Amino acid sequence: MAETPFTISVPDEELARLRAKLELTTLPNEVEGAGWDYGAPLSDIRRLVGKWKNGYDWRKHEAALNAELPQFTRDIAIDGFGSLNIHYVHKKSDCPDAIPLLFVHGWPGSFIEVRKILPLLTETSPEHPSFHVVAFSLPGYGFSEPVLKPGFHGPQYAELGNKLMLSLGYNEYVAQGGDWGYLITRKIAEIYGGKHAKAWHTNFPIASPPSPVWNPLSFLGLITTMYLSGPSQEKANLERAKWFRENGSGYSAEQGTCPQTLGYSLADSPVGLLSWIYEKLHVWTDNYPWTDDEGS
């Protein structure tokens, strides 16, 4: 399992094909006054497509990614699935006692999620711990080889992450994950906790509602949480959850049941992929000030 340095270098013919497809884009009509109620607004997508065609310099961003993120690939053998060529970022801290950290992204993200926080994690400071950071691309994301055999689930993702860390010489490490990364790092904690995975952090906690009738302690915890957060915040949280169930989860039903059908559009249409992901970047990131370059 030798490590191979990796440099992002998209062929010129791929960029030319992208530009040709952007020039042939057909945009749909839009219901008057719909705003975000029906998904990504036409005005936003039209602006981003224009930026992509006429104002986006991929080579500049490609060079910046290569300069900021030390990237590698390595073959990882997964039981029952053979060997997968996995792409990852590996940035070591100058601190001799730095903690190895496995950073796992989710959907619709990528290894680039670690980009802005990487200098903060690896810096040496007496005020907080430093980390040797490993951020791998999930199979089929970015530059990692996809899995084309069914049945690749949580235990296999956990096996991949654990074997990657061991191959880098990190016999003990901690893990962080959000979205799919949450599910994967939780499984890593379940399977490899204690011996290899020493701690787990997530920014995407999921828990079932308590059952007050059968579990008085859960009920007490619920009341305490409501008291500390305040009734207005609790009400807002419940309203947001209700909105998501009714209006924001359709993508998951489609991706979880008919991914092949959806894949034809996302693989063939750059604007279809742009709008599919842009909607989630807008809705899920609490008014984060995305630039048009980031959106493109």
Image (cartoon, rainbow, N blue to C red):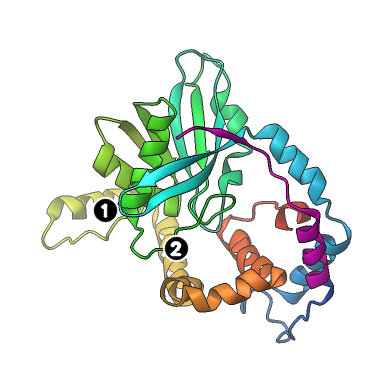
State which quadrant residue 1 falls in: top left
**Extent of the magenta region:** 1-22
Residue situated in front as seen by the camera: 149 or 43: 149
Query: Dot 2: few (<14), some (14–19), or many (≥20) neighbours within 10 Å?
Result: few
Residue that sits furthest to the left in the current view: 214
The image position of residue 290, as x and y in percent, is 70, 53
The image position of residue 114, as x and y in percent, is 57, 40
In this image, 62 relative to 99: left or right? right
In this image, 176 relative to 278: left or right? left
Task: Name the residue tied to disc 2.
Answer: 148
Q: Earlier in the sequence, mark 1 or mark 2?
A: 2
Q: Is residue 181 above or below residue 124?
A: below
Q: Are marks 1 and 2 in contact (CB under 8 Å)?
A: no
Q: Residue at point 50% right, 48% down? A: 105
The image position of residue 275, as x and y in percent, is 67, 69
Please name which of the two marks, 1 or 2, marks the residue nearer to the observer.
2
Q: Examine the rendering and report whether any part of residue 250 can be seen.
A: no
What type is the residue that disc 2 sits on?
A: Leu
Task: Name the residue tied to disc 1.
Answer: 223
Residue situated in front as seen by the camera: 221 or 9: 9
